[in-house]
Image (tube, helix red, strand yellow):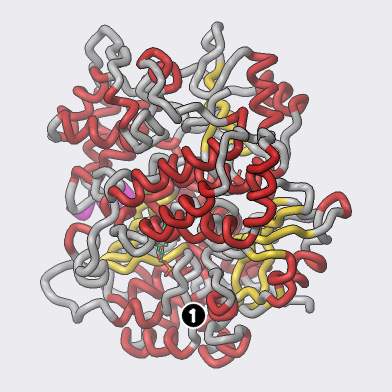
């Protein structure tokens, strides 16, 4: 199925980051001009009717999230844009930041009108230097054209947009950790409630939305909520950007409607598994998503409901393909290392649990595991799940447990063979506390050590 | 930053040399930038990440003395600055080489051969993750997903993402690398002036 591009039609055109080009060729800001004349409640109703869902990972209905913001009182309201793109396998927000930042800015204007906000912060991961520069350039142009700033678009109100750099921490993608980080603190998630819509940034009502979610708003209003809803399937409207990577012939970002078949993505758009190999497994929604076996992938469709019903999740729309020559122990070890590395350390089940998971996986990878270690891994996962302040706990427990459950036979055979995994040599030995000097030598690294 | 306890910041329990030996005096221009940045937030303390980026962009790393200078400029307790510096991996608490070579070690890059790149860095340049070459030119770090997995295996060399990489391509890029664009320059724009004017 060929798909008419929306965001992809913008970011694939050269110079679309320039205001004049975006206005001339893509009618940029036309929808924002129209929406700011609507009642905020009507804007929220339209977004609800369109069934737009959050594309940052959680799939929460966007219109409903906005409706939680209380009526305007003494406190300012804020929009915080999540551009901390960090879910392993995901690389779609940067397409927008680099290729069509005005679609995002237009979405920001629309959202701020709906939630009565005069200030938006865009929190961009600190590694995205060129992306921040692009975005800042687009913002500067928008200020100069009166689209932002004092009396923006002739509304008589201000709208300021600030680009804020992150500094390297996966957890800051979680919305309350992001808010803490933006306030100038360590990025550790908050207990909820209160939810950000009531007490978010600077203790004021705040909406946190992903870059891609907001960037679809101009299209939603251009085609109308009904048409947007009809584009999608299974309870979610519209399209989304799927990041396809791993053992695939044509990795890249593909814009597809909700409900698009997984195998059409892999074999059609993606050109099939690389090197003419066979499919072993697919991670369908970012590293946090439980894995699908090749058989399960045949039935899978890319939308929140289908994947949830299959026991996985659509998450951030990141599909990672794994070929049949990949030993599962390497996948398990790599995943456990990531979560161990990125745990913010606030909750004991997550901090210690992710450490134990990594230690056990490393021991297995070194050929020193026991079959009962697999049960231990599942037990630790069960104890992390549901027992942490934020969903990082599930993001750790779900994928790791799914690897063990779905590839148990292979992992048992590996353990019984006493082999050493090819990846094992690359991980720093912190099974036993190493002497201080040795730790000092690797302080500041991410843990991988030869 | 994984330390012996396996959580962020643990590495800082280890007594490593973090003093540069000389007090850090921030230039007037930097202090003016900091003031402008502080004015962009309802709570000026929120400027700490961009401010630390700016200071690191100028000094190359964040020594304890630099933390003291930032604490003063930000009117924040040193402990709060320290807490932030040690939480985030992009802030370097050790002197760094002039060129950063951050090789991604996460899933998609691992699947497509990231280890070959680390092996090459070890064999050709004599550096393991976290180490700087003897000539001080580059520091290697093993980093988590940089969100450019379509170009796996990939690395950020100085300011720019590169991939898919082979050892030969890596050599070529390292030979040409210049320090390049900085975070603080990338986020400096006219909206700051507009917000400051409002106040
Ligand atoms: C551990 C963790 C990491 C996350 N990382 C990101 C991220 O990198 N980008 C993002 O947009 N959302 C991320 N999220 C989801 C956010 O918490 C939040 O749901 C989202 O930004 C809301 O925007 P949306 O409704 O438009 O998707 C993460 C969540 C968790 C639990
Ligand atoms: S896994 Fe390396 S960039 Fe994403």
Q: Chain of mark 1?
A: A
B43 lies above or below A111: above
Name, please, the residue furthest toward the bottom: A226
Residue A96 picture location, percent across and down: 56, 59
Identify the residue position indicated by label 1 in the image. A52
Is residue A194 rendered to the left or right of residue A275?
left
Quadrant in the picture for the N terminus of chain B = top left
Q: Residue at x 23, y 50 (%)?
A: B41
Task: Say if disc 1 is inside 8 Å of ligand 1.
Answer: no
Residue range in magenta is B187-199
Q: Residue at x 27, y 13 (%)?
A: B19
SS class of the residue under badge 1?
Answer: loop
On the question of residue A149 being in view, the answer is: no
Picture quadrant where residue B169 is located = top right
On the question of residue A76 being in view, the answer is: yes
Q: Residue at x 52, y 11 (%)?
A: B136
Quarter for ligand 1?
A: bottom left
Residue B187 or A94: which is nearer the viewer?
A94
Residue B189 within the segment the image draws in magenta: yes
Residue A423 or A61: which is nearer the viewer?
A423
Dominant SS in magenta: helix
B11 lies above or below A202: above
Q: Residue at x 29, y 62 (%)?
A: A119
Is residue A396 rendered to the left or right of residue B47?
right
Residue A190 picture location, percent across and down: 24, 58
Residue A387 picture location, percent across and down: 31, 60
Residue A312 or B47: which is nearer the viewer?
A312
A318 lies above or below A35: above
Residue A223 picture location, percent across and down: 57, 86
Residue B22 within the segment the image draws in magenta: no
Count numbered badges in the picture. 1
- Neighbourhood count class around disc 1 (C-alpha, 10 Å): few under 14, some 14–19, many 20 upward: many
């Amino acid at each position: 199925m060929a798909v008419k591009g929306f965001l992809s039609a913008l970011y694939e055109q050269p110079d679309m980051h320039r205001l004049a080009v975006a206005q001339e060729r893509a009618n940029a800001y036309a929808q924002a001009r129209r929406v700011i004349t609507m009642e905020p409640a009507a804007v929220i109703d339209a977004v609800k009717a369109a069934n737009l869902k959050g594309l940052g990972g959680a799939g929460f209905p966007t219109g409903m999230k906005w409706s939680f913001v209380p009526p305007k009182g003494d406190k300012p309201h804020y929009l915080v844009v999540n551009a901390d793109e960090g879910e392993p396998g995901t690389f779609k927000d940067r397409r927008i930041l680099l290729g069509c930042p005005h679609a995002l800015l237009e979405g920001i204007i629309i959202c701020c009108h709906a939630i009565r906000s005069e200030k938006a912060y865009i929190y961009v991961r600190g590694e995205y230097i060129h992306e921040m520069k692009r975005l800042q350039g687009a913002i500067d142009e928008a200020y100069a054209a009166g689209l932002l700033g004092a009396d923006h678009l002739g509304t008589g109100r201000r709208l300021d947009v600030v680009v804020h750099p992150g500094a390297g921490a996966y957890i800051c993608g979680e919305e309350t950790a992001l808010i803490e980080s933006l306030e100038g603190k360590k990025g550790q998630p908050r207990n909820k409630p209160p939810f950000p819509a009531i007490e978010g940034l600077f203790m004021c009502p705040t909406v946190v939305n992903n870059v891609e979610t907001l960037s679809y708003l101009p299209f939603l209003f251009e085609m109308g909520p009904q048409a947007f809803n009809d584009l999608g399937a299974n309870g979610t409207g519209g399209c989304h950007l799927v990041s396809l990577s791993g053992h695939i012939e044509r990795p890249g970002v593909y814009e597809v409607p909700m409900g698009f078949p997984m195998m059409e993505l892999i074999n059609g758009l993606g050109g099939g598994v690389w090197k003419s190999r066979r499919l072993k497994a697919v991670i369908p929604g970012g590293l946090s998503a439980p894995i699908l076996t090749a058989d399960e992938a045949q039935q899978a469709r890319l939308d929140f409901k289908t994947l949830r019903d299959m026991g996985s999740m659509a998450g951030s729309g990141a599909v990672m393909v794994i070929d049949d020559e990949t030993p599962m122990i390497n996948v398990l070890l790599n995943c456990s290392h990531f979560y161990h590395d990125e745990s913010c350390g606030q909750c004991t089940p997550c901090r210690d649990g992710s450490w134990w998971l990594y230690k056990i996986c490393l021991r297995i990878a070194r050929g020193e595991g026991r079959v009962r270690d697999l049960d231990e891994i599942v037990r630790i996962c069960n104890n992390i799940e549901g027992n942490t302040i934020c969903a990082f706990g599930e993001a750790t427990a779900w994928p790791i447990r799914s690897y063990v459950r779905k590839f148990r036979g292979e992992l048992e055979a590996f353990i019984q063979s006493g082999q050493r995994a090819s990846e094992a040599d690359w991980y720093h030995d912190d099974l036993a506390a190493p002497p201080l000097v040795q730790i000092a030598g690797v302080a500041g690294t991410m843990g991988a050590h030869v | 930053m994984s330390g012996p306890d396996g959580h962020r910041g643990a590495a800082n329990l280890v007594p490593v040399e973090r003093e540069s030996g000389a007090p850090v005096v921030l230039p007037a221009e930097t202090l003016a930038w900091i003031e402008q940045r502080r004015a962009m937030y309802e709570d000026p303390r929120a400027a700490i990440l961009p401010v630390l980026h700016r200071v690191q962009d100028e000094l190359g790393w964040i020594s304890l003395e630099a933390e003291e200078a930032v604490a003063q400029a930000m009117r924040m307790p040193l402990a709060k600055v320290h807490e932030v510096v040690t939480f985030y991996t992009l802030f370097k608490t050790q002197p760094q080489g002039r060129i950063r070579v951050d090789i991604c070690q996460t899933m998609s890059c691992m699947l497509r051969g990231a280890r070959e790149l680390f092996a090459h860095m070890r064999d050709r340049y004599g550096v393991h993750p976290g180490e700087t070459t003897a000539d001080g030119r580059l520091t290697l770090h093993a980093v988590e997903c940089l969100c450019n997995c379509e170009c796996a295996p990939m690395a950020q060399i100085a300011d720019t993402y590169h991939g898919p990489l082979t050892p030969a391509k890596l050599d070529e890029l390292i030979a040409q690398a210049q320090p390049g664009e900085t975070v603080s320059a990338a986020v400096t724009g006219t909206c700051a002036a507009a917000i400051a004017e409002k106040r």
